[in-house]
Image (cartoon, coloured by chain):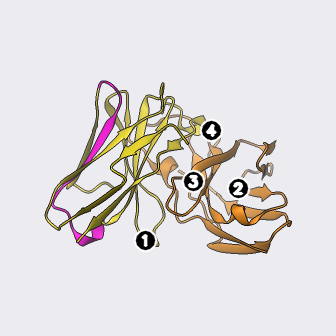
Amino acid sequence: LAKTTQPISMDSYEGQEVNITCSHNNIATNDYITWYQQFPSQGPRFIIQGYKTKVTNEVASLFIPADRKSSTLSLPRVSLSDTAVYYCLVTTGAYSGGGADGLTFGKGTHLIIQP
Amino acid sequence: DSGVTQTPKHLITATGQRVTLRCSPRSGDLSVYWYQQSLDQGLQFLIQYYNGEERAKGNILERFSAQQFPDLHSELNLSSLELGDSALYFCASSVSGTRLSTDTQYFGPGTRLTVL
């Protein structure tokens, strides 16, 4: 299953737009891209999911180019409360039996927002 | 509040002991997942159950075991505990778990295990 690579950490300032890019060169046809957010000592929380092009919800946007080898999570006008770890996952389109690669969160990107 | 509950919230025990962590999924969710998060480590997937049956296995040690009961709650049993087992243990649930691609996981608040 496709392995993901994302920056270990990023920082930005309140009011800025933040883009976190994730590489997944070996993504398969049936795979989706899912992003989760985790605050310290809390469980991760689903942010957004997409297959191709652009997906937007009330929290974020997800941009996926045509080759789907990468994706970018975009957080508009961040605030201090957006300081968290962001995980990019590639999840398989069909359960293959015994496989758990699609459930690998890795270490994520530590996003720090400063005043 | 995700709707997933985990007990206990904190657990302190000694090396060599055995503990049981409990998870109740969201109402209607059939799948339960267990994860371990150690200091400076990412979230490590341990095991998934779907409607009472083991569905996927990750980096779960032989000293660890889990099960999902008919009422869909799940328990994670950790035995012969070592110092390195100290971590946050998260449970998550999802509606089906049969289509991983679009199956959103809802995480509980976690159980913090400290092994002394």
In which chain is the residue bearing label 1? B
Callout 3: few (<14), some (14-19), or many (20+) C-alpha neighbours within 10 Å? some
Whole-percent x, y for residue A63 in the image = 80, 51
Which residue bears the numbered disc 1? B39
Q: Do the residues labelled 4 and 2 touch (CB within 8 Å)?
A: no
Residue B76 part of the magenta segment:
yes
The amino acid sitting under disc 1 is Leu
In which chain is the residue bearing label 3? A
At numbered mark 2, what does the secondary structure look like: helix, strand or loop? loop
Q: Are marks 3 and 1 in contact (CB under 8 Å)?
A: no
Q: Are marks 2 and 3 in contact (CB under 8 Å)?
A: no
In which chain is the residue bearing label 4? A
Q: Quadrant of residue B6?
A: top left
Q: In this view, does A35 lie to the left or right of B116?
A: right
The amino acid sitting under disc 3 is Ala
Which residue bears the numbered disc 2? A69
At numbered mark 3, what does the secondary structure look like: helix, strand or loop? loop
User: What letter labels the chain drawn in yellow?
Assistant: B
Q: Is residue A43 left or right of residue A98?
A: right
Residue B81 part of the magenta segment:
yes
The amino acid sitting under disc 2 is Lys
Whole-percent x, y for residue A94 in the image = 53, 34
Q: In which quarter of the image is the C terminus of chain B?
A: bottom left
Q: What range of the chain is rendered magenta?
A: B70-85
Instruction: Find the distance from the CA under tag 1 to the CA under tag 2.
Output: 30 Å
